[in-house]
Amino acid sequence: MKKGKLIVLSAPSGTGKTTITKELLKRNPKWQFSVSATTRPPREGEVDGKDYMFMSKEKFEHYVKFGDFLEWEFVHGNRYGTLTDPLYESLDEGKIMLLDIDVVGGRSVMEEFPDDTLSIFIEPPGLNIAEQKIVLEDRLRSRGNEQTTQIKNRLKRFETEMEFKESFNLHYVNEVLEETINLINEDIKERM
């Protein structure tokens, strides 16, 4: 049996990676989704076990203590983590699994599974960091579910996240969402 593949989609917050991931899964119903665990409350419309595994800080700490996470991180006041077992199962079963994950988490997956990972970095449009930050701030504000402090924290993290883009296999600028999705979908299929 052919071994599976992990597709890591990483991007600064507000760049569109979750929207892109959802559309890729719609177009490719056989692909799996790595459901990350988080201690943050669900956003409107999010479903526990489908979008995230929403859990208490105590339950999350229990998983950390027993080494159940491949990686976990404290981001924007909440904990996020990737459980290890589903990744191994997907690879062993020859499946393709998408991971919608932050830049640091994406790098952890690439380090743990170097031969089994296709890594994708998505960035906002703009000629430079300053222009990209303006686009991101507009996108984050348009969500309508983030406080000003959260938006500022996400924008502070942006420059650090951008420094890691060269360690990813593929790079995309998400200027026109539909075009970006089409390109990513085609590029993944070419490499499978």
Image (cartoon, rainbow, N blue to C red):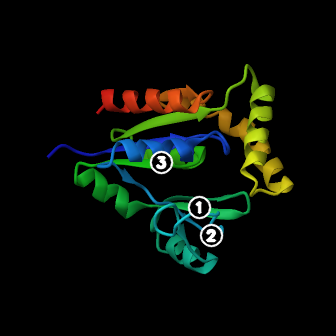
* Rendered view: 125 above or below 88: above
Residue type, label 3: Lys
Residue type, label 2: Thr
Residue under label 2, please give it.
39
**Residue 189: x %, y % from top left:** 32, 31
The label shown at residue 80 is 1
Q: Quadrant of residue 3?
A: top left
Tags 3 and 2 touching, CB below 8 Å:
no
Is residue 5 shown to the viewer in this render?
A: yes
Residue visible at 48% across and 33% down in the picture: 181
- Image quadrant occupied by the C terminus: top left
Mark 2 neighbour class, 10 Å CA radius: few under 14, some 14 to 19, many 20 or more? many
The label shown at residue 147 is none
- Label 1 residue SS: strand
Q: Residue furthest left?
A: 1
| Separation of residues labelled 2 and 1 (CA atoms) | 7 Å
**Residue 31: x %, y % from top left:** 33, 48
Tags 2 and 1 touching, CB below 8 Å:
yes
| Camera-side residue of 13 and 81 | 13
- Mark nearest the camera among 3 and 2 is 3
Is residue 107 shown to the viewer in this render?
A: no
Residue type, label 1: Tyr
Residue visible at 33% across and 41% down in the picture: 116
- Label 2 residue SS: loop
The label shown at residue 22 is 3
